[in-house]
Image (cartoon, coloured by chain):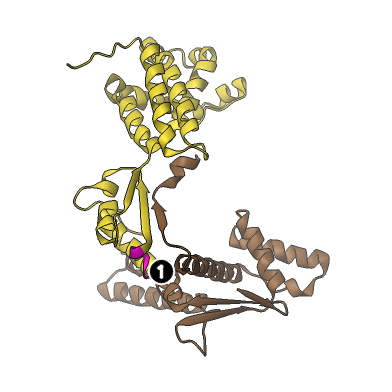
Chain colours: A brown, B yellow
Amino acid sequence: MTVKDDKLVFNISARIVDTIIGDLFFHDDEVLATADSDSESDDDMANTIVKKAAKTAKEKTNAFKLFVKNENDPDSYQVVIPNAMRFELAMDHVSIGMSFRQAATTIQHARDHTKTATLSGMNDLIVGQYVRVLVGGNLQDISDLMGDLSVWAFSLAFDSSTHFE
Amino acid sequence: MFVRHTAKILYNLLCKFLDALYPDWRVKLLNASSDGENTMTGRHAGLITCITWCAEFNVLRVWCVPHQIDIIVKSSAEGINGGAYVKDVYSFSIHLRSQHNLIIQMGVKSPKKTNRWVHLDRILNFYKQYRRSIIAHTLEKLSSDMWWVITYAVAPAVDEINITFAKLQSRSLLVAQQAEFINALIGTLTTVFCIEVIDPD
């Protein structure tokens, strides 16, 4: 992650974006499972499934609007966040357990009371996109750490919550 | 993680994730610790077993002590009175949580019983502390004398186990120091219940 002129730039490898964020966090089974079975005929059923699939596909494209293929390096995505303060404020709110909608509304209130124009135009979808970018950025950092030459081993712990009850 | 948690599904998911994160993870894997449950450590298809097979070098497997005690104490608690006791504790807490008059009168609400072991202790101590009000309110309809006797007998042991749990969870503790605490716990429990340890030979 680099900062310049109030801009945040994340470089995230295509493996992480495509597999983890794009695939593991979305699931196609849901489309079939949530298609209601109370449709009258099979045609209706098929239509519902097609509609739902189209809707999910659209949601996925929207979710990935911020991720742009890097021109110089086809194996990585670049995300540019133009308004660093708004991004960081949103992430601070989410980090204390606020929902996306709450975070967006809080920022709107902050904008209204402080008359700060740069905080305008926040909504829950943008917060969601920001979180996705941040998760990608963090995974990239972990990946860089694991790939570092001075790191020669790592350890996996399953169900660690028992230790920190 | 939207499907069943069988070892194979977990393994495929984990591999997919780690492959995307760092494709050479198999070379650098040093240690895998788990709760020792069957899905994790099964001899043929446990998750840890599969990971050990695909790793480049020998993997250090840790089945951590708090997790081991957790499995044992839970199963022993469920063995009390053929499983009926723990079930009663559970349903009694649900009943008490919905008694609004009693809650207002005592000024406290019964803690929730979950499958977390530590919560059993909280709930038993709650019963002990507010025994009179609870008995007066339920008019002994719901809890038999035997149930209260078991509660009073079990609570100190659960207390002791939880103290050991807290010690074992401390961040500065080394794996080598854990045995000492376990032995101390066994010592205390044998004294509390006057158990004689007989050598099988």
Total marks in image: 1
- Image coordinates of residue B67 in percent, x first then y, are 37, 38
Residue B142 visible from this viewpoint: no
Residue A143 % position (x, y): 47, 68
Please, is residue B46 above or below residue B36 in the view? below
Q: Quadrant of residue B26?
A: bottom left
- The span shown in magenta is B22-27
Residue for point 34% across, 25% down: B77
- Residue drawn 70% across the image and 61% down it: A106
Q: Quadrant of the N terminus of chain B?
A: bottom left
Q: Depth check: B88 or B26 in front?
A: B26
Relative to residue A118, is residue B135 drawn left or right? left
Q: Of all residues shown, which one is farthest toward the bottom?
A: A71
A37, B118: nearer the viewer: B118
Q: Chain under label 1?
A: B
- Find residue A45 and report its horizontal and vertical position in percent: 30, 72
Tell me if residue A76 can be seen: yes
Position in image of residue B98 (x %, y %): 50, 30
Residue at the limit of the structure toward the left, as seen here:
B201
Between A43 and A123, the one nearer to me in the picture: A123
Residue position for label 1: B22
Determine if the magenta segment contains residue B110. no
Picture quarter containing residue A101?
Answer: bottom right
Residue B171 as seen in the image, left or right of residue B114? right
Q: Residue at x 54, y 15 (%)?
A: B133
Does residue A116 sit above or below A5 in this rendering? above
Three-letter amino acid code at disc 1? Tyr
**Image quadrant in which you'd find residue A85:** bottom right
Question: Up-down: is B120 above or below A25?
Answer: above
- Neighbour tally class for label 1: few under 14, some 14-19, many 20 plus, Cα within 10 Å: some
